[in-house]
C-alpha cells in the first residue's frame, strides 16, 4: 500500500489502481518505422496535444542522447497499443553529462484508451526502470529533459497519467506552465512600444554570430540555453533577437527554433534587468512569429507567471507537474 503525500496526490493516486493484464502483450524497442503509427496513436491518446512527425523525430532519433534500448513499445497482435520513451544524458550538452549521469528521464508515455488499466504502462515502466538501474541511474524524472523534450512534465488534466505515476512511487518535484497565445489577437501594447532602453538597442542576430553568441548564452545562463540558442542559427536569418549596449550583449530571445510555434528561451543578464529589455525582446520575437505566419505561439516550461500576463491573446494556460522517483 502506498502511503504519504499530499491529499491532492492521494486523490489522484486512488483514481488509478493497477490491475494485471491477462492477454499477451509484447514489449520491444522503438524502431524508426514505428514513428508514424506512434505519432497517430499519441495524438488520439493525448487529447490536449498535437504531435507532429518532426517533433517525434526530434525527441527520439535526432536526439544525440537517444538510445532505443531505453524505449518500450507495447504490441498486441502486432498492433501498437502503448509506448514509453526514456533517455539518459550521455552526449549533449557535453558540459552536463557528468553532473546528470545518475539521472534518467521519461519523455513520453501513453497507452491506447481501450488498453488502459491492464498493466501495460506498469510493464513498460518496470522495463525502463530496470535498464536505468543497470546503467547506474538513481533518479527518474518526468519529463524535463532540456533540449529534446515535448513537455516540461505531466499536464494535470491527464489525471490518469498523474495517478499512475503517483501509484508507482513518483512525486511532484516542481511545477511549470505553458502559455498559449492566439497571434490573431496579439498586438504590442502602448506601454511596451513606449519603452526607452536608455542606450541599449535590439536587433536580429546575424548568421556569423553563432559561435560567439551561443558561447555567451551558455556561460551566462546554462549549456541548455546555449544549445537552444544555437538551434536558432539553423535558419537564415537566425530566429533570435539580441539586446546589446556598446557591443556588449545584454540579453536574447529565441523563437521557432525547436518547434515552429514555440517561443523561448529568453534571458537578460542579471545586471541589465528592470529596464524593460526583456519585454522588448519578448514582443519583438512574437511580432516575428506573427509576421512569419504562425497562428499560435506557445511559451513553454516557465515559472514566470506575471511576466507573460502582459501579452495580449493568451487563450490557455497549461499546468504541469515535473515528477521524480528515487530508484532503490
Image (cartoon, helix red, strand yellow):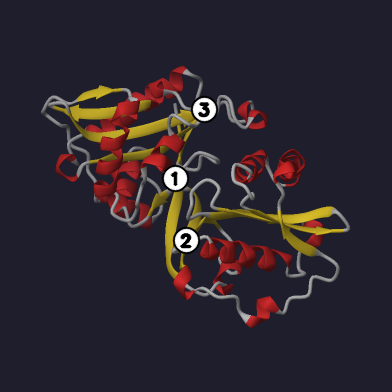
Q: In the drawing, does residue 149 fall left or right of residue 51?
A: right
Res 97 seen here: yes
Residue contact at pointers 3 and 2, CB within 8 angstroms: no
Q: In the drawing, does residue 265 fall left or right of residue 34?
A: right
Q: Secondary structure at mark 2?
A: loop
Res 30 seen here: no
Quick check: 129 above or below 12? above
Q: Position of residue 243 (x, y in %)?
A: 75, 59
Residue, far right? 246
In percent of the image, x 56 and y 66: which residue is there?
305
Nearest the viewer among 22 and 59 is 59
Which residue is denoted by mark 2 in the rendering?
294
In percent of the image, x 47 and y 27: which residue is there?
66
Q: Earlier in the sequence, mark 1 or mark 3?
A: 3
Q: CA distance from mark 3 to mark 2?
A: 30 Å
Q: Residues within 10 Å of mark 1 (few under 14, many from 20)?
A: many
Q: Position of residue 27 (x, y in %)?
A: 25, 24
Which residue is denoted by mark 3 in the rendering?
65
Q: Residues within 10 Å of mark 3 (few under 14, many from 20)?
A: some
In percent of the image, x 33 and y 56: which residue is there?
48
Residue contact at pointers 1 and 2, CB within 8 angstroms: no
Q: Earlier in the sequence, mark 3 or mark 2?
A: 3
Numbered tag placed on residue 150 in the rendering:
1
Q: CA distance from mark 1 to mark 3?
A: 15 Å
Residue, far front? 236
Q: CA distance from mark 1 to mark 2?
A: 18 Å
Quick check: 291 above or below 112? below
Amino acid at each position: 500500500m502506498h502511503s504519504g503525500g499530499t491529499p491532492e496526490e492521494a486523490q489522484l493516486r486512488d483514481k488509478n489502481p493497477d490491475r494485471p493484464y491477462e492477454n499477451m502483450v509484447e514489449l520491444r524497442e522503438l524502431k524508426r518505422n514505428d514513428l508514424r503509427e506512434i505519432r497517430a496513436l499519441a495524438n488520439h491518446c493525448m487529447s490536449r496535444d498535437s504531435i507532429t512527425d518532426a517533433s517525434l523525430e526530434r525527441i527520439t532519433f535526432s536526439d544525440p542522447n537517444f538510445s532505443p534500448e531505453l524505449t518500450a513499445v507495447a504490441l498486441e497482435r502486432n498492433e501498437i497499443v502503448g509506448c514509453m520513451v526514456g533517455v539518459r544524458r550521455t552526449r549533449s550538452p557535453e558540459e552536463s553529462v557528468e553532473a546528470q549521469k545518475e539521472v534518467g528521464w521519461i519523455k513520453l508515455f501513453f497507452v491506447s484508451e481501450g488498453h488502459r488499466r491492464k498493466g501495460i504502462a506498469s510493464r513498460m515502466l518496470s522495463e525502463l526502470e530496470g535498464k536505468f538501474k543497470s546503467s547506474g541511474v538513481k533518479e527518474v524524472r518526468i519529463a524535463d529533459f532540456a533540449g529534446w523534450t515535448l513537455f516540461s512534465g505531466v499536464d494535470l488534466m491527464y489525471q490518469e497519467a498523474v495517478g499512475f505515476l503517483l501509484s508507482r512511487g513518483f512525486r511532484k518535484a516542481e511545477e511549470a506552465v505553458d502559455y498559449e497565445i492566439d497571434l490573431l489577437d496579439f498586438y504590442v501594447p502602448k506601454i511596451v512600444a513606449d519603452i526607452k532602453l536608455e542606450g541599449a538597442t535590439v536587433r536580429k542576430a546575424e548568421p556569423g554570430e553563432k559561435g560567439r553568441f551561443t558561447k555567451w548564452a551558455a556561460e551566462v545562463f546554462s549549456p541548455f540555453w546555449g544549445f537552444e540558442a544555437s538551434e536558432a542559427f539553423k535558419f537564415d536569418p537566425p530566429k533570435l533577437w539580441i539586446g546589446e549596449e556598446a557591443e556588449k550583449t545584454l540579453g536574447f530571445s529565441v523563437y521557432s527554433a525547436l518547434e515552429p510555434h514555440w517561443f523561448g528561451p529568453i534571458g537578460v543578464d542579471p545586471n541589465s534587468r528592470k529596464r524593460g529589455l526583456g519585454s522588448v525582446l519578448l514582443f519583438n520575437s512574437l511580432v516575428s512569429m506573427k509576421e512569419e505566419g504562425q497562428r499560435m505561439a506557445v511559451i513553454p516550461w516557465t515559472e514566470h507567471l506575471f511576466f507573460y500576463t502582459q501579452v495580449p491573446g493568451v487563450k490557455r494556460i497549461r499546468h504541469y507537474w515535473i515528477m521524480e522517483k528515487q530508484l532503490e
